Amino acid sequence: MAQNPVLREDSFERLNALNVAQPMTLQGTINKTFLLLFICVLCAMFAWTNMQIFMSGIVWVIALAALGVALAVSFKPAWSPVGAPVYAALEGLLLGGISAAYNAQTNGIVFNAVAVTLLVFFLMLAVYRLQIIRVTRGFAIGVFCATGAICLLYIGSFVLSLFGVNPAYLTSNSPLSIGISVVVCIVAALNFLLDFNFIDQMTRRYDAPKYMEWYGAFGLLVTLIWLYIEILRLLSKANSRR
């Protein structure tokens, strides 16, 4: 069971009958995740140094394009060798603009957020490899429910904002808001364990072709981006209390 919406078991089941010479592996998926991350960082650096592109409506075009590519890859995993890098590039442009805005408020916050995000990723990978936390069905259901609750919380806050209500419990620097951000970061980190376990199980159960490593890497990148944004928001709240 994986909470990540792009990592679906039926995508692997459709490939089970194929005779694959070079099957997908967990290590290969992780390697491609770092390649996608590299592309994302390069594009983020470009956006950081060319902030003028975010002063116009093109940012919405980039956001919609990223969403379209994500949906295409989710439903057509065979497109992932091309779609995943394109998605990483588009998300990099968006993250570069977001990061520059946060850094303008608190210098150095982006470097700290990137460092913490990567540290958490490697920590969760080590935790999974060493089986310090076993991904049981109960654990997976717990993380699934927690992630779903967070999703509903954000949707509810968005609806409130449409009616002019400021959801201070998410946007302020109050202890409650910071506490919620900490919980969200923990849940996002635990989702890595589900992602690793799901990809590992799929590679053991099905002889998926090599290109599915791009599909798995795409799913891990989605979680990485989510965690990075949440850590960035958490650090921003904590720094504003000083």
Image (cartoon, rainbow, N blue to C red):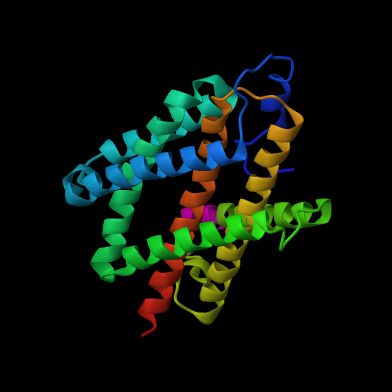
Out of 208 and 168, give the one closest to the viewer: 208
- Residue 135 in the magenta stretch? The answer is no
- Does 87 appear above or below 41? above
- Residue 158 in the magenta stretch? The answer is yes
User: In the image, 160: left or right of 133?
Assistant: left
**Which portion, as a residue range, is magenta?**
157-165
Image coordinates for residue 30, horizontal then vertical, percent: 53, 43
Out of 126 and 40, give the one closest to the viewer: 126
Q: Image point 23% across, 51% down: which residue?
A: 48
User: In the image, 50: left or right of 122?
Assistant: left
Image coordinates for residue 16, horizontal then vertical, percent: 73, 20
- Does 223 appear above or below 186? above
- Does 174 appear above or below 55? below
Q: Main secondary structure of the magenta part?
A: helix
Q: Is any atom of residue 219 visible in this view?
A: no
- Does 144 appear above or below 170? above
Image coordinates for residue 213, horizontal then vertical, percent: 55, 32
Look at the image and tell me in which quarter the N terminus lies: top right
Q: Image point 26% across, 36% down: which residue?
A: 58
Q: Image point 49% across, 51% down: which residue?
A: 224
User: In the image, 97: left or right of 27?
Assistant: left
Which residue in the rendered view is the most extreme toward the bottom?
242
